[in-house]
Amino acid sequence: MSTFAGSNSDILKLQPKLIVHGGAWNIPAAYEQDHLHGVQTAVSEVYPQLLAGASALDAVEAAVRILEEDPTFDAGRGAFLNEAGQVELDAMIMDGATLQVGAVAALQNVLHPVSVARRVMEKTEHCLLVAEGALRFAKSMGFEELAPEELLTARELKFFEEIKNQEGFKTHHPFLNAPSDTVGAVALDCFGNLAAATSTGGTARKMVGRVGDSPIPGAGAYADNALGAVSATGWGESIMRVLLSKTVCDLFENNEAMEAARMGIEHLAQKVQGFGGIIGISAKGHYAFSHNTPKMAFCFADPDGSTNAFIKCPR
Ligand code: GLY
């Protein structure tokens, strides 16, 4: 793992790492710049905090909050609508140092589900709260309950109108041609701790109460300091069937980081004909990313803080 000497020479600090994604799907050319700008903003705002000593958990929460706020993405504001025309949000956060995890699913009217997930992890004895119970908990923690329209965008309303009565519509079809997707972040802090977080509005026209991979530990994200940390994006029903994030973390143990990412996506495609993408950081501190969708928006930081943003994996 790359290292640098901190100001206190007794403490060997690690070089922090940060990678974020803004969804794996067929991002139309007209939306590419917004996606690149969104992921780059998250990294350029949060990486300096990691350099200054922020924890990996704080970093992934902060990065995902930026992406939830950005209407470009299917998370927080700008999320897909379910079959009833409502926004229902899923999110999780995981601490690689302790394997503690917090998650929420089918949460309505809250802008930052990732922060509610973190409170679930830190303030309850549970890992996952859903729907009305998740909202009640969020309000008890001081989160503002927004009017439903505040998370809606004109783009998503228009898209919903286009697909709501479409014959033969399947919820995974929009991954090949839709306006947005899931977000996530993975960080390694200068104390050697890893964390991962994922947040989503799920799939367009999903059934009311449908929960995807994002809030399921091992599926939508996973973090273990001994292995690595991963956040996934893509077709949730396929990702959860192969526990994609945990699978890639396990593959980190005996493979180069990029090879582990490639093998995980190949496993998703071969086992369940799934599609999606992952970002990660191995326990050795190496970045990993791969997808089998036409595109995936992602960005990672170099040690000097410069950002590397991509709309698909460089070949
Ligand atoms: N990967 C997001 C979802 O399927 O819900």
Image: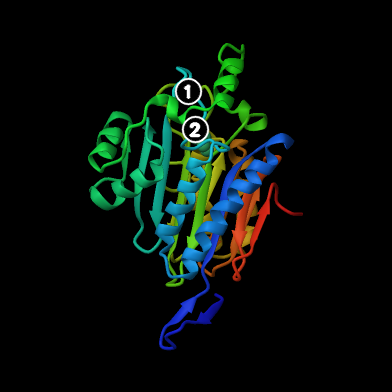
Looking at the picture, how far across and down is residue 108, in whole percent?
A: 37, 30
Q: Dividing the image into 4 quarters, which one contains the N terminus?
A: bottom right
For the point 56% across and 38% down, the residue is: 73
* Residue with the mark numbered 2: 202
* Residue with the mark numbered 1: 82
The crowding category of the residue bearing disc 2, from other C-alpha atoms within 10 Å (few below 14, some 14 to 19, many at least 20), is many
State the residue in front, 297 or 305: 305
Asked if residue 217 is positioned above or below residue 132 in the image, the reply reads below
Q: Is mark 2 within 8 Å of ligand 1?
A: yes
Asked if residue 163 is positioned above or below residue 120 in the image, the reply reads above
Query: Secondary structure beneath disc 1?
Result: loop
> Do tag 2 and tag 1 residues touch (Cβ < 8 Å)?
yes
For the point 30% across and 35% down, the residue is: 134
* Residue 32 relative to residue 205: left or right: right
Looking at the picture, how far across and down is residue 5, in whole percent?
A: 50, 84
Query: Secondary structure beneath disc 2?
Result: loop
